[in-house]
Amino acid sequence: MELEDVFPNSPFEPWRPVSPEKFKGRVKDRDKILRRIPHVIKDGRAEHFFITGKRGMGKTSFINYVSRVAEDNYHMIPIHINNSGGKTVDELIQKLLDALMREFKKEYLGKKIIDKILNTIQEFKVAGTGVSLKDTNDLIQNIKNHFADFLIKTCENLPEGSGIFIVIDDLNGLSESEEFTNWYKGFFEIMDFNEYHLPIVFTLISYPEEYEKLCDLNESFFRIFHLIEIDNLDDNDIIDFFKSSFNDVGIEFEDENDSLSSMVFFSYGMPLIMQLIGDSVFWNAYEDLKINKNIVLISIAQAAEELSKKQLRSKLSKIRSETYINIFLKLANNGLMTFKKSEFKQYLSPEERKSFDGFLKKAKKLGIIESIGKKNSGEYGFVNRLYLVYFVMLSAQTGYDKRMGK
């Protein structure tokens, strides 16, 4: 018996960007980018997008999917850069060069295009499947100072009818860099105000607050981009995601409405939670190929534990007060992503009310709760929906355990 017959492949991929072929939903956001690509290629006018969204919303999965469609349907060459840890434009240029050479060394482009575009490089070495550049400090400075010219030269050597789809993911390290905003605005203006053929799509990815920081650094920065905010998926997309994912692997619902409604509710429109719940349900259901409400509830509890271990533990482990946990659970039971201090107190016990100021201070210090609204308005909210979802799932697990007599 083959090992895959004992342990089949799950159709879900928590903790990693979803494979483009498995991506579902976000059609409107996808088309905001794709509808411009034919004009980018035909007119040679670059387009710039900024993708924002809270943690767990699937920004990277979304742009991986869009770039795959752009490659397959419009002959766009994908150049993906993960800028994690990068805090300077020099580091970004280095990563861009590495990504360009990895892509351009492929058979359909060939080494000739590398020689034409990067003819000042004397030596490079292949490292694994990629390419690492050597002694490139002067080259990087030259490209940084003349980046528009570098892009023009690059595009001159592209195959006819093609373009470049550049993705710069995890821009957080540059969010306080005025050098970056000035540099980007500088080459944008050269490209925009001159008649060069530049079939390029730029897509930058970061959190909403990081985008705001960049705009604060340079008031003209936001005018460059089409802003796409990746938010919660709607219920119909979530239902379609679960039904098609389980159908593809031959798993059926015994009580479709009950099971699906619970999975949709606890997903809270967040792709990361959908993947966690789906993966847990799969492993609990794959032997009998049946899903029911009991399996779903057990799986939601397991997903909550997995979420805590992998993404929230560093902060949640610092909350040792049972009273504070109970306050979080009451926020979750009432579905309160945001709340007003004076109004929420009605749900608290006398002991919880006494501890409420300390709870808010601790939760704000840990970055779980933040002040919102006007100053001294007494309005608060979870910093990220992941925290609310975790306590919603934890509350459901607690209720389930009580009903089972645990």
Image (spheres, helix red, strand yellow):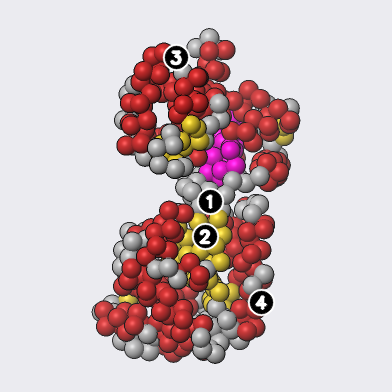
Q: Nearer the viewer, mark 4 or mark 3?
A: 3
Q: Amino acid at mark 1?
A: Gly
Q: Is residue 284 magenta?
A: yes
Q: Which residue does the numbered mark 2 point to in the structure image? A: 51
Q: Where in the figure is residue 381, as x and y percent of width and height?
A: 46, 37
Compared to residue 311, the image places residue 183 above or below, namely: below
Query: Which region of the structure is painted magenta?
Result: 267-285
* Residue contact at pointers 2 and 4, CB within 8 angstroms: no
Q: CA distance from mark 4 to mark 3?
A: 61 Å
Q: Which residue does the numbered mark 3 point to in the structure image? A: 349
For the point 41% across and 74% down, the residue is 184
Task: Specify whether 342 is left or right of 360.
Answer: right
Q: Nearer the viewer, mark 1 or mark 3?
A: 3
Q: Which residue does the numbered mark 4 point to in the structure image? A: 38
Residue density around tag 2, few if under 14, some if 14–19, many if 20 or more, within 10 Å: many
Q: Where in the figure is residue 48, as x and y percent of width and height?
A: 53, 71
Q: CA distance from mark 3 to mark 2?
A: 43 Å
Q: Amino acid at mark 4?
A: Pro
Q: Which residue does the numbered mark 1 point to in the structure image? A: 58
Q: Is residue 388 magenta?
A: no
